[in-house]
Image (cartoon, rainbow, N blue to C red):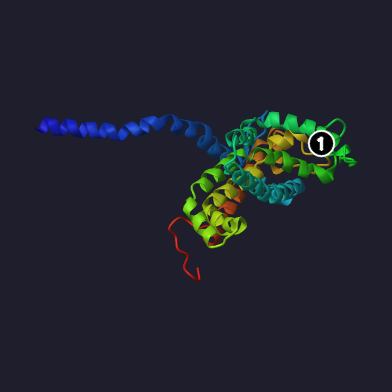
């Protein structure tokens, strides 16, 4: 009897450990490739760490120099925030419009869903090559198409006034993932609610404002946060399309950190730059979460007046 009880306890103990064995590869990968480098970069930020010589501990000097003696720090930060202010709302609107389109009961809609999603799985390098060809001022297809209606296209990639808009358009090309997230949430809204609203005389626009938008606010919150993070960390497209030019009009914070690390060989300084952006993203995320209590509605939640 005692032996059976002991054996049962050992089986339960093994059973409790089995799930951890399945997630062990992820845990190892997280510790080795994410948490480890993250902690190491924090240590590096307190050192003068050139690639070709030994590191020297300098305490908070990297952060002091960044705030007090580096004007490019503020310029690149301002350009990045400008990009995010345009990109985030535009990205959300495009993804939501596409999600509404692919929910329509039209023949062949599965094909359109696939087409709209495909750019999201294409690598950033491939997208930059495609958009570099489209926006080329000499032989680009966009300016060629504009010439048919008598419009002389701008020099998209070499004019400081248009360059950042070019990056916004190219970045918005990959809204497929956000579109699918919106789509699954919209499809989850019961059809009976729309039918009841239609019987009460609500037109499609009123249904969208009063039913669809409130129902998907948790998804909007998620997409806003992920879009803000992606916008503030934008690097691949701008690095390959403009390289930060012309006249550093697209010198994003990501390029600033990249150049400090691998062009100027100031690894410690670049680590301090990266950690400052981490703090900014953390604060913005907390601010968005804090504001969500005023505009995000969850299922079965009733908002009390005055709150």
Depth check, front residue: 170 or 59: 170
Q: In which quarter of the image is residue 48?
A: top right
Depth check, front residue: 124 or 297: 297
**Residue 55 visible in the snapshot:** yes
Instruction: Give the quadrant of the N terminus.
Output: top left
Q: Is mark 1 on a helix, strand or loop?
A: helix
Figure check: 105 above or below 200: above
Q: Name the residue under label 1.
A: 142
Q: In this view, does 245 lie to the left or right of 87?
A: right
Residue at 10% over, 33% down: 2
Residue at 59% over, 40% down: 106
Figure check: 119 above or below 82: above
Q: Which residue lies furthest to the bottom in this view?
A: 306
Q: Quadrant of residue 3?
A: top left
Q: Residue furthest left?
A: 1
Residue 126 at x, y percent in the picture: 69, 28
Residue 254 at x, y percent in the picture: 68, 40
Figure check: 147 above or below 92: above
């Amino acid at each position: 009897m005692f032996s059976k009880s002991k054996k049962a306890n050992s089986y339960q103990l093994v059973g409790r450990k089995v799930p951890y064995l399945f997630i062990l590869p992820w845990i190892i990968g997280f510790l080795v490739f994410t948490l480890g480098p993250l902690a190491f970069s924090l240590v590096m930020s307190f050192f003068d760490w050139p690639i070709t010589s030994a590191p020297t501990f300098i305490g908070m000097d990297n952060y002091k120099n960044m705030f007090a003696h580096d004007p490019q720090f503020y310029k690149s930060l301002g350009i990045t925030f400008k990009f995010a202010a345009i990109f985030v709302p535009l990205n959300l609107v495009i993804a939501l419009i596409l999600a509404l389109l692919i929910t329509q009961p039209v023949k062949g809609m599965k094909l359109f869903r696939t087409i709209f999603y495909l750019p999201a799985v294409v690598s950033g390098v491939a997208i930059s090559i495609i958009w570099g060809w489209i926006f080329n001022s000499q032989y680009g297809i966009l300016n060629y198409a504009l010439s048919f209606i008598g419009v002389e296209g701008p020099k998209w990639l070499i004019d400081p006034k248009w360059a950042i808009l070019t990056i916004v358009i190219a970045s918005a090309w990959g809204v497929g993932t956000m579109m699918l997230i919106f789509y699954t949430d919209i499809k989850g809204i019961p059809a009976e609610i729309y039918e009841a609203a239609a019987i009460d005389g609500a037109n499609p626009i009123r249904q969208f404002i009063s039913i669809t938008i409130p129902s998907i606010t948790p998804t909007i919150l998620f997409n806003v946060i992920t879009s803000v993070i992606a916008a503030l960390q934008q690097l691949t497209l701008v690095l390959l399309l403009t390289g930060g030019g012309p006249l550093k009009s697209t010198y994003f914070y990501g390029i600033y950190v990249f150049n400090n690390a691998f062009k100027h060989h100031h690894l410690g300084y670049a680590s301090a730059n990266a950690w400052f952006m981490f703090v900014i993203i953390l604060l913005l995320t907390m601010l968005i979460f804090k504001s969500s209590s005023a505009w995000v509605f969850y299922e079965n939640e009733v908002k009390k007046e005055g709150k």
